[in-house]
Image: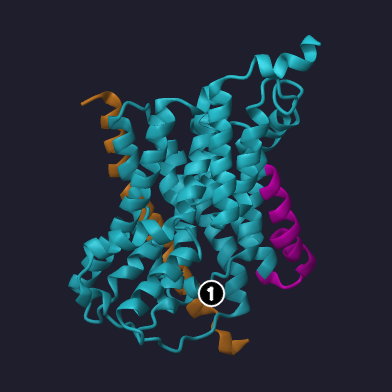
C-alpha cells in the first residue's frame, strides 16, 4: 500500500508550482502559438520530471539518459544546426554581404548582458551562458549552456525560446523609442540584384567553415554543422538528405530536445531566485540586441548618402523570419507603400550567421 | 569592481572587435566569391 501512496506523500508545493510553470508553457504553445515546437515538449518534460520518484528521470530514467546522450554530449544542438542549415537560403546574404555588419551589431546584447550578469554576481561562465540568450538562437544557447552552465540549462533554454516567440512584443517598443517617425519612413529602393551562381552557393558554406574554423577551432561544431546542412541543400545532388535534414531530422531532434530540456526543470533547480534573474536578463539581452542593431544603422546613416531605414538594424538577431517580418510590418504601418521586407529579411539571414559567430567567439574567449 | 566584472568588460572589449573582424572577413570573402563566379557564366 505504501508504494501506491509514495507519490502523494512526497508531493510538495514546489512540484505543484512547477506543474503550473509547465502548464503556462503548454498554454502559451497551444493557445498563443509561441514556439510550440519547443515550448510544448519542454512543458511536458517539466511535468514528467516534477512527479515525485518519477521513473522518467534519475539514474534509469529515459530523460536523464537522453540528457546525457543528447545534450551533455552536444549532439542534439549540433544535429539541429544541420537541420537549420538545410533550411537556410543564404542568397540574400551573398548578394548583400554588408547585411552581416547589422547582424554583428545586433549581437551587442550578448556582451552587454554578460557584463550585467557579472555585476549581479554570476561567475564569468554563467554570465557568458546567460548573455548568449541574446544570440536569439536556441541551439547556440543550449550548446554554450552545456559547456558553461549545465545547472542553468533549463531556464536558459526556456528564456531563449520564449523571448524568440515574443519578438513581436519586445522589439517594436525598443525600435520606436530609438527612432523618429522620419527615420521609420525612410524608403529603401529594391534594386534588381544579380542572381547567385550555384558555384558561389556551394563554395559559400565551405568557405565560411574554413575561415571560422581557422580563426576559432572551437566554433567548428556550431558553424560546421550549420554549413554542412546548407551544403547538402545547395549542392542539389543529395535532395533526399536535404529533405531528411529539413523534416525528419529537424522534427525528431526537436521533439527529443524539447522534452529533454524540460526534464532539467526540476523544482529544486528552477524555483530559485537565480532563475528569475536569468529570465530577466534574457529579456535585457533581447532589448540590447535590438538597440545595438538600430543604433548601428543610425550611425551608418551619418556617413552614407543613401539613407537606410534604421529599423532594419533590429533584424540582425537570429530570430528568423519573425524579426524581419516584424520590422517590415512596422514600416508598412508607418507608410503602407513602404516595402522594406527584402532588406529586412537579408539582415535577418545575416543575423543567423552572426549569432553563431558570436557564440563561437564567446566559446573561444571564455576559459 | 569585482574580478568577474573586470573580466566581463575585458571580454566585451575583445569579443566585439574580434566578432566584427571575423564578419568583415566573411563579407570580403563572400563579395569576392560572388564576383568570381557570376551567375550568367553558368
Magenta region includes residue A205: no
Q: Which residues are magenta?
A: A234-256
The overriding secondary structure of the stretch rendered in magenta is: helix
Residue A63 in picture, x, y percent from top left: 71, 32
> Magenta includes A239?
yes
Instruction: Report the side of A108 relative to A231 (left or right).
Output: left
User: How many other residues sit within 10 Å of disc 1, few (<14), some (14-19) or many (≥20)?
Assistant: some
Shown in orange, the chain is: B
Residue name at image x 33 percent, y 82 percent: A188
Q: Is residue A309 above or below residue A292?
A: below
The tint chain A carries is cyan
Front-most of A120 and A104? A120
The residue beneath circle 1 is A91
Q: Judging from the image, what secondary structure is the residue with disc 1 in?
A: helix
Which of the image's four quarters has the C terminus of chain A?
A: top left
| The image quarter in which residue A282 lies | top left
Amino acid at each position: 500500500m505504501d508504494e501506491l501512496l509514495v507519490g502523494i506523500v512526497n508531493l510538495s508545493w514546489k512540484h505543484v508550482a512547477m506543474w503550473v510553470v509547465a502548464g503556462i508553457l503548454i498554454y502559451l504553445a497551444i493557445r498563443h502559438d509561441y514556439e510550440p515546437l519547443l515550448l510544448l515538449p519542454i512543458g511536458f518534460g517539466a511535468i514528467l520530471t516534477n512527479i515525485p520518484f518519477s521513473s522518467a528521470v534519475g539514474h534509469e530514467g529515459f530523460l536523464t539518459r537522453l540528457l546525457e546522450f543528447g545534450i551533455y554530449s552536444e549532439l542534439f544542438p549540433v544535429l539541429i544546426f544541420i537541420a537549420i542549415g538545410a533550411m537556410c537560403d543564404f542568397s540574400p546574404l551573398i548578394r548583400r554581404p554588408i547585411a552581416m555588419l547589422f547582424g554583428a551589431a545586433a549581437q551587442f546584447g550578448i556582451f552587454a548582458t554578460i557584463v550585467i550578469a557579472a555585476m549581479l554576481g554570476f561567475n564569468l561562465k554563467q554570465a557568458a551562458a546567460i548573455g548568449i540568450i541574446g544570440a536569439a538562437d536556441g541551439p547556440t544557447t543550449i550548446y554554450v549552456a552545456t559547456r558553461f552552465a549545465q545547472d542553468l540549462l533549463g531556464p536558459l533554454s526556456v528564456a531563449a525560446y520564449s523571448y524568440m516567440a515574443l519578438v513581436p512584443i519586445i522589439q517594436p517598443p525598443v525600435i520606436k523609442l530609438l527612432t523618429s517617425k522620419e527615420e521609420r519612413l525612410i524608403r529603401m529602393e529594391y534594386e534588381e540584384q544579380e542572381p547567385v551562381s550555384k558555384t558561389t552557393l556551394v563554395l559559400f558554406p565551405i568557405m565560411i567553415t574554413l575561415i571560422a574554423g581557422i580563426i576559432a577551432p572551437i566554433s567548428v561544431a556550431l558553424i560546421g554543422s550549420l554549413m554542412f546542412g546548407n551544403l547538402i541543400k545547395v549542392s542539389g545532388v543529395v535532395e533526399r538528405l536535404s529533405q531528411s535534414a529539413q523534416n525528419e531530422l529537424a522534427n525528431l531532434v526537436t521533439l527529443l530536445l524539447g522534452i529533454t530540456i524540460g526534464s532539467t526543470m526540476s523544482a529544486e533547480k528552477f524555483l530559485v531566485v537565480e532563475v528569475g534573474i536569468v529570465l530577466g536578463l534574457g529579456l535585457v539581452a533581447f532589448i540590447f540586441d535590438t538597440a545595438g542593431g538600430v543604433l548601428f544603422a543610425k550611425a551608418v546613416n551619418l556617413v552614407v548618402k543613401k539613407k537606410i531605414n534604421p529599423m532594419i538594424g533590429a533584424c540582425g538577431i537570429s530570430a528568423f523570419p519573425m524579426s524581419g517580418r516584424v520590422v517590415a510590418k512596422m514600416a508598412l504601418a508607418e507608410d503602407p507603400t513602404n516595402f522594406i521586407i527584402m532588406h529586412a529579411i537579408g539582415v535577418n539571414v545575416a543575423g543567423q550567421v552572426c549569432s553563431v559567430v558570436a557564440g563561437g567567439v564567446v566559446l573561444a574567449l571564455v576559459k | 569592481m569585482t574580478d568577474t566584472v573586470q573580466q566581463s568588460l575585458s571580454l566585451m572589449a575583445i569579443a566585439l572587435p574580434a566578432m566584427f573582424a571575423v564578419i568583415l572577413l566573411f563579407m570580403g570573402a563572400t563579395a569576392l566569391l560572388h564576383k568570381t563566379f557570376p551567375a550568367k557564366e553558368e
